[in-house]
Image (cartoon, grey):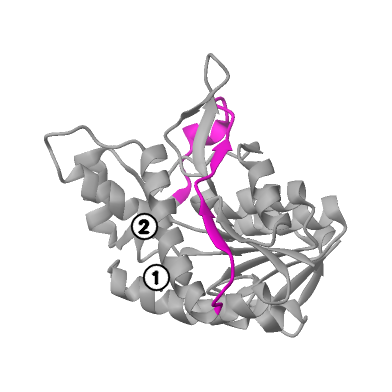
């Protein structure tokens, strides 16, 4: 069976941890065991988030005052290479002899997407409210609360909808050839069609779950797994009345009732995949990946 697995930034960095490479390598080493259990049984495409890492790269680039800040498409490409290397390093230890490849991937967006006017995608480290608002004044950032309690804040970036994966056919050939492909990292390098039709970068960060959905549909995979740091989809998240949905019809899910920039795009992704392909999609904890595939954990979203 063909499976597309989308892992969040928590696969490399758990909430509250510093952005050191040691933490990311250790966390990915643990995650690799769960991912290998799937990849050893199925043809697997792996998509990853990059929110913490691309935010850090932006801060590092901004610290050097003798050069203009690097644009987000370039930082997105840089994060794909860095994270892909850490993922490959961990997977090769638990999947010796496997063909694993990281592919720099560009994702086409519409330059007139209204998302450019309403930044919503969190990137970079966590801040308290006072620090976040000071950074707004100092650097002109957009910031927003991150999480249900509003105690931590993050920088937010425009997140236009993915329209096409530039390297789609290359990914297809690699998958059909038996490679485990790590691609569309961070949702892909954000690009638009230039005057000559060739891709050119834009200032954005694409949601990796929506890009994973688009890629899964185009590749014709039978399962989409979105793996994160929560058990599954909850109603009334963050309230005493919250309840885990173990199984739900795609038609019964309303993306608008979930938080923008976090769970909402995941809901949009699994809902669209299930309705357009007729195959189930899943959301759950990375550590439970095998149990989620077996229908024993997480949330199953049926067509």
- Secondary structure under tag 1 reads loop
Q: Quadrant of residue 269?
A: bottom right
Give the residue displayed 61% in from the left and 56% down from the top: 264
Mark 1 lies on residue: 13
Q: Quadrant of residue 296?
A: bottom right
Query: Is residue 84 visible to us here?
Result: yes
Q: How many marks?
A: 2
User: Contact (CB < 8 A) between labels 1 and 2?
Assistant: yes
Quadrant in which the C terminus is drawn = bottom right
- Secondary structure under tag 2 reads helix
Q: Is residue 227 left or right of residue 63?
A: right
Measured Cα–Cα span from mark 1 to mark 2: 9 Å
- Residue lying at the far left in this picture: please name it: 66
Is the residue 198 above or below the residue 298 in the image? above
Mark 2 lies on residue: 53
Residue 10, how many percent across, how many down? 46, 69
Q: Is residue 86 left or right of residue 233?
A: left
Give the residue displayed 66% in from the left and 57% down from the top: 257
Residue density around tag 1, few if under 14, some if 14–19, many if 20 or more, within 10 Å: many
Residue 274, how many percent across, how many down? 81, 58
Q: Is residue 190 magenta?
A: no
- Residue lying at the far front in this picture: please name it: 97
Q: Is residue 40 left or right of residue 248?
A: left
The region drawn magenta spans 95-121
Residue density around tag 2, few if under 14, some if 14–19, many if 20 or more, within 10 Å: many
Q: Is residue 96 magenta?
A: yes
Quadrant in which the N terminus is drawn = bottom right
Q: Which mark is residue 160?
A: none
* Depth check, front residue: 231 or 47: 47
* Depth check, front residue: 247 or 241: 247
Q: Quadrant of residue 114?
A: top right
In primary-sequence order, the first of circles 1 and 2 is: 1
């Amino acid at each position: 069976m063909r499976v597309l697995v989308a892992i969040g930034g928590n696969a490399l960095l758990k909430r509250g941890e510093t952005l050191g490479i040691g933490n990311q390598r250790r966390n990915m080493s643990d995650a690799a065991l769960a991912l290998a259990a799937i990849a050893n049984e199925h043809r697997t495409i792996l998509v990853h988030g990059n929110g913490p890492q691309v935010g850090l790269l932006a801060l590092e680039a901004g610290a050097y005052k003798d050069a203009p800040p690097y644009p987000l498409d370039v930082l997105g490409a840089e994060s794909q290479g860095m994270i892909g290397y850490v993922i490959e390093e961990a997977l090769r230890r638990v999947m010796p002899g496997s063909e694993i490849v990281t592919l720099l991937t560009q994702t086409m967006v519409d330059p007139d997407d209204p998302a450019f006017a309403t930044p919503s995608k969190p990137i970079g480290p966590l801040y308290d409210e006072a620090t976040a608002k000071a950074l707004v004044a100092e650097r002109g950032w957009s910031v927003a609360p991150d999480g249900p309690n509003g105690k931590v804040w993050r920088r937010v970036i425009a997140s236009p909808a993915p329209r096409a994966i530039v390297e789609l056919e290359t990914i297809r050939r690699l998958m059909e050839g038996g490679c485990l492909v790590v691609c569309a990292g961070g949702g892909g390098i954000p690009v638009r069609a230039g005057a000559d039709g060739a891709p050119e970068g834009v200032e954005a960060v694409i949601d990796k779950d929506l890009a994973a959905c688009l890629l899964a549909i185009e590749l014709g995979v039978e399962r989409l797994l979105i793996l994160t740091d929560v058990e599954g989809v909850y109603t009334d998240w963050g309230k005493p009345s919250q309840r885990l949905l173990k199984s739900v019809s795609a038609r019964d899910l309303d993306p608008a009732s979930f938080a923008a920039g976090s769970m909402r795009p995941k809901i949009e992704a699994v809902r669209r995949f299930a309705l357009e392909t007729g195959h189930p999609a899943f959301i759950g904890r990375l550590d439970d990946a095998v149990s989620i595939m077996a229908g024993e954990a997480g949330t199953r979203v049926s067509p």
